[in-house]
Image (cartoon, helix red, strand yellow):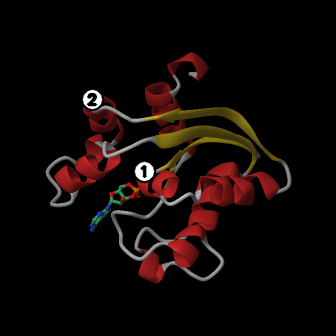
């Protein structure tokens, strides 16, 4: 099924010069294409909407500090089964649980600085696209 999803390359990805590598892995998947790309340092208000479900968790404040620490890249990716597909490419949230060949498994070591976000469902994708790309909603 053709879907679209919201992907964030987090500040660690941009800072470490891994944006090209990660976008390249996404682009090489057959039938997927970039529909929107923007480099931006997110403000707190935007991230409070995005991470609303995590308010009150112990990792919430450090997560917002990290996510506002420098530029990220937001993308909309479209294509066949792209919602579960990019989650699979990213690997588990905890990089130590992420398999070799996944983005987090290959390049990350700690859970907060895990390089990439990808929507976990089609409903989340539509909610998150409204936050980061209101003109594409
Ligand atoms: P993501 O799944 O994109 O969205 C929630 C983010 O919170 C997650 O990536 C991590 O960056 C961060 N996160 C989730 N759980 C933890 C945790 N236990 N410790 C630190 N950061 C976390």
The quarter of the image that holds ligand 1 is bottom left
| Residue 99: image location, x then y, percent | 57, 81
Residue at the image position 27 percent from the left and 29 percent from the top: 45
Circle 1 packing at 10 Å, graded few (<14), some (14-19), many (20+), is many
Viewport quadrant of the C terminus: top right
User: How far apart are the two marked residues, 1 and 2, measured between alpha carbons?
Assistant: 17 Å
The numbered mark at residue 121 is none
Specify whether 97 is left or right of 136: left
Residue that carries the numbered disc 2 in the rendered image: 45
Asked if labels 2 and 1 touch by Cβ distance under 8 angstroms, the answer is no
Is residue 14 positioned above or below 48 on the image? below
Residue that carries the numbered disc 1 in the rendered image: 11
Residue at the image position 72 percent from the left and 39 percent from the top: 34
User: Which one is earlier in the sequence, the residue at label 1 or at label 2?
Assistant: 1
Specify whether 88 is left or right of 115: right
Residue at the image position 36 percent from the left and 73 percent from the top: 110
């Amino acid at each position: 099924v053709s879907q679209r999803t919201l992907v964030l390359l987090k500040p660690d990805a941009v800072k470490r010069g891994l944006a090209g590598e990660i976008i390249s892995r996404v682009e090489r998947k057959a039938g997927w294409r970039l529909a929107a790309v923007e480099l931006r340092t997110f403000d707190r208000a935007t991230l409070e909407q995005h991470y609303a479900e995590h308010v009150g968790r112990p990792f919430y404040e450090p997560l917002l500090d990290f996510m506002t620490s420098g530029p990220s890249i937001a993308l909309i990716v479209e294509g066949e089964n792209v919602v579960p597909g990019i989650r699979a490419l990213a690997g588990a949230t905890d990089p130590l649980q992420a398999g070799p060949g996944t983005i987090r498994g290959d390049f990350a070591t700690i859970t907060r600085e895990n390089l990439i976000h990808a929507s976990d469902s089609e409903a989340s994708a539509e909610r998150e696209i409204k936050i980061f790309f209101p003109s594409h909603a």
